Amino acid sequence: MLQVWRGTDRYRGGDEAAGIDTRHAFSFSGFYDPDNVGFGQLVACNEERLAPGAGFPEHPHRDVEIVTWVAEGELEHIDSTGRTSRVRAGDVQRMGAGRGVRHIERNAGPGPLRFVQMWLVPGVRGSAPGEGHDPGYGYEPEYEVVHGIADGTPFAVPRTEAVMHVRRLGEGERTAVPDAAWVYVHVVRGSAEIGSGGSDATASGSSDASSGEGPGAAGAAPTGELLDAGDAARITDARDLEARGAGGPVELLMWEMHAEPGYG
């Protein structure tokens, strides 16, 4: 089943006076919808827009994996472990909060900053009760930045059964959507169509969204749902689907997930 969630329907948050515009895909902070609290292991997907100098003061996290994709601008990160970094467009950042960490995020560049921040609840199939999410099982905070991640490179998130695939497409170019129990596709820029693959398409692999395809691959284009920038598709039991650039350049974040959060 494929459901499209439009960017225009996201919950609006932030602080306009402070130069912060936040758009939530799921229940978050002061916004709560019991029918929209997460998908697979993904419990937050926030589009953040920060004016120069704007940011979030020091605040805590624990027992969550936070993945940030910078679409434009420069994000400065400072945390309680002493780590500082600058994350720029095309970089992916992961912070494993573990037992607990505090951090600051702000726009360190001269122009606007736009990034997508996604939170995942740890836990894997077959884990013992409490393992991977119970505070008593917490791990020391972790942090990493992959600069200029290559197109199609899978980014696996530790302590989860989730992999993020970054795909960049031109007009008419195609990529396989991973076969998985839960797939979340977020359109960062451009427009894309998601639907059944062409008749000559090779089945996608379970851990590499680029498996069996190439830009401009021949065959019939998928016929399905059209998504614009800010839109997302939530797909359960994804099989033999493709995404096609419908107005390049297109940038997609595709989450391949094989588990839901476990709470003991």
Image (spheres, rainbow, N blue to C red):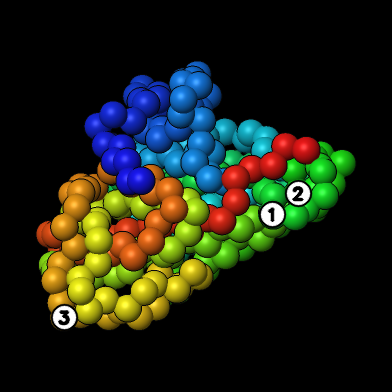
* Left or right of residue 35: residue 245: left
Residue 80 seen in the figure? no
Q: Are marks 1 and 3 in contact (CB under 8 Å)?
A: no
- Residue furthest right as drawn: 136
The percent position of residue 214, horizontal first and vertical second, equals 27, 80
- Residue located beneath label 1 in the image: 124
- Residue 132 is tagged as 2
State the mark number for residue 204: none
In terms of depth relative to the viewer, which is nearer, 58 or 65?
A: 65
109 relative position to 136: left or right: left
Please say if the residues under marks 2 and 1 sit with CB atoms less than 8 Å apart.
yes
Relative image position of residue 221 (x, y in whole percent): 15, 67
Q: Which mark is residue 218?
A: 3
Question: What is the three-letter code of the residue carrying label 2?
Answer: Gly
Vertical arrangement, residue 105 with respect to residue 195, above or below: above
At 62% from the left and 35% from the top, the residue drawn is 58
Badge 1 or badge 3: first in the primary sequence = 1
Residue at 69% across, 42% down: 262
In this view of the protein, which residue sits in the foreground, 178 or 163?
178
Is residue 226 visible to the viewer in this orientation of the structure?
A: yes
Q: Distance between the Cα atoms at labels 1 and 3?
A: 37 Å
